[in-house]
Amino acid sequence: MELVKRIKSKGPRLDIIEGGQGPTEGSVAAIPAHPRKYSTDLPVSGAWFPGDPVGHRRFLTITDGHPFALEPGGNLTEAVQAYETWGNLNSDGSNAVLVCHALTGDSHVIGESNTAHPTNGWWDEVIGPGKSVDTNEYFVVCINVLGGCQGSTGPSSLDPSIGRPYGSRFPEITIRDIVRAQAKVADYLGIESWHAVIGGSMGGMQVLEWAAMFPERVQRIAPIATALTASAQQIAWSAVGRSALALDPRWRGGDYYDADIGDGPYAGLAIARAIAQIHYRSDVSFQNRFGRSLVDKDSLFGLWDRFQVESYLDYHGEKLVRRFDANSYLVLNRAMDTHDLARGRSSMEDAVKRITADVATASIHTDSLYPPHQQLEIQRLISEAGGVCSYVEIEDPNGHDGFLLAAEGIGDVLRSLLES
């Protein structure tokens, strides 16, 4: 007898058939046994929820009774920012450094993983006591972005109007919305002007918007492995990843939070991550690490026999499922697509003229997702506008992920900027 599960949804009834032969009357899709054989204990969402260990996080409600308006037109009646800090703010507030995280990052930029923080600090080799961004000297702040899932308001947060997670009801946001929410935290902390704002990839997009939106509040910026505007190829990669996620029947149109463990959109999110992981790394890094090695050296010709590189992609897919939220992935990935520093500012040249901060940009020479010509374009336009912008191309085999892994090269760029 077929096992049919009734799934709660705002739309029509969904009859999901485990191991079924196809859709039945009134159903949307059948869920086959996935050939990748993901773990059976994967969470419905890897988000942080109230009641979970807080760890190093602090929380700030930025709405204070007034809705937070969003650039695409919606609003949030209540919005919280989760953030972490290291070091001490000096008496005149002049030593504050804002670190902006990338798509699947969070506020835990420094420190070991534990029950509260699912991963080690993502720039642990670059930031800390005695390191390139020295927390003995600087007051370092990192904020989980609006739309994220590690304490800041996002799709997994409770919608105060109904007392359930937003899910599909969460509004669209932009990088500018993320930056305006961060500015509320800066106000609360008493930071009138950042000594520097730094970050890579999506973090670099925030960095650029900080300098264009609040030029009087930013003295130095380091937009690394990023772009002034999302390119057609970047948008194309993102679109394929989002489609893979949304085609998982367990995504349920975004309303999956009351599902059981092992019944969430893990396959869609894992595949989206696998797609991204391919262009986060370089051909040379994959070839050097895996070549054509097999998981089982005696098993090659079965349709789902795996090369080691396939196992690597599956591992990173599951790893993300355990610490991230599928809806946040969609919302933030789309915000990256709509990133365009020139939007509403006449031209890119006029947008760049708004930047008065000293700029240090850097590329990873094997980065095919945000290739060096995009960072060279940042340098060219800022220089032509009369600004100050240094540029470094870092030799690293790891592709786009080099902005996280090339600690020495990235550290040198940041140290020089902070000391300028």
Image: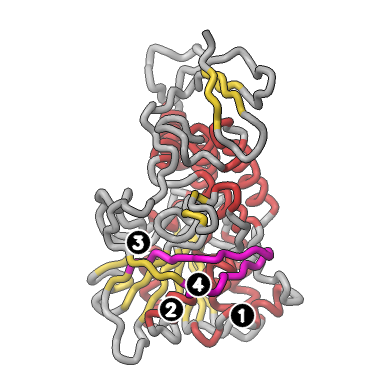
| Kind of residue at disc 2 | Ala
Q: Nearer the viewer, mark 3 or mark 1?
A: 3
* For marks 1 and 4 on the same chain, the one whose residue lies earlier in the sequence: 4
Please name whichever residue, 368 or 181, is drawn nearer the observer in this view of the structure: 181
For residue 63, which numbered disc appears in the image? 4
Q: Nearer the viewer, mark 4 or mark 2?
A: 4
The x, y position of residue 144, in whole percent, is 43, 62
Label 2: which secondary element: helix
Whether residue 34 is visible here, answered yes or no, is: yes
Label 4: which secondary element: loop
**389 to 157, vertically: above or below:** below
**352 to 392, vertically: above or below:** below
Q: Residue furthest bottom?
A: 92
Q: Residue furthest front?
A: 162
* Label 3 crowd bin: few (<14), some (14–19), many (20+), radius 10 Å: many
Please name whichever residue, 300 or 11, is drawn nearer the observer in this view of the structure: 11
| Kind of residue at disc 3 | Val
Q: Are marks 3 and 1 in contact (CB under 8 Å)?
A: no
Residue receiving disc 2: 186
| Kind of residue at disc 1 | Ser
Gap in angstroms between the C-alphas marked 4 and 2 = 14 Å
Residue receiving disc 1: 383
Q: Nearer the viewer, mark 1 or mark 4?
A: 4
Gap in angstroms between the C-alphas marked 3 and 1 = 31 Å
Residue receiving disc 3: 109
Gap in angstroms between the C-alphas marked 2 and 1 = 29 Å
* For marks 2 and 1 on the same chain, the one whose residue lies earlier in the sequence: 2
* Label 2 crowd bin: few (<14), some (14–19), many (20+), radius 10 Å: some
Label 1: which secondary element: helix
Q: Are marks 1 and 4 in contact (CB under 8 Å)?
A: no
Q: Is residue 14 magenta?
A: no
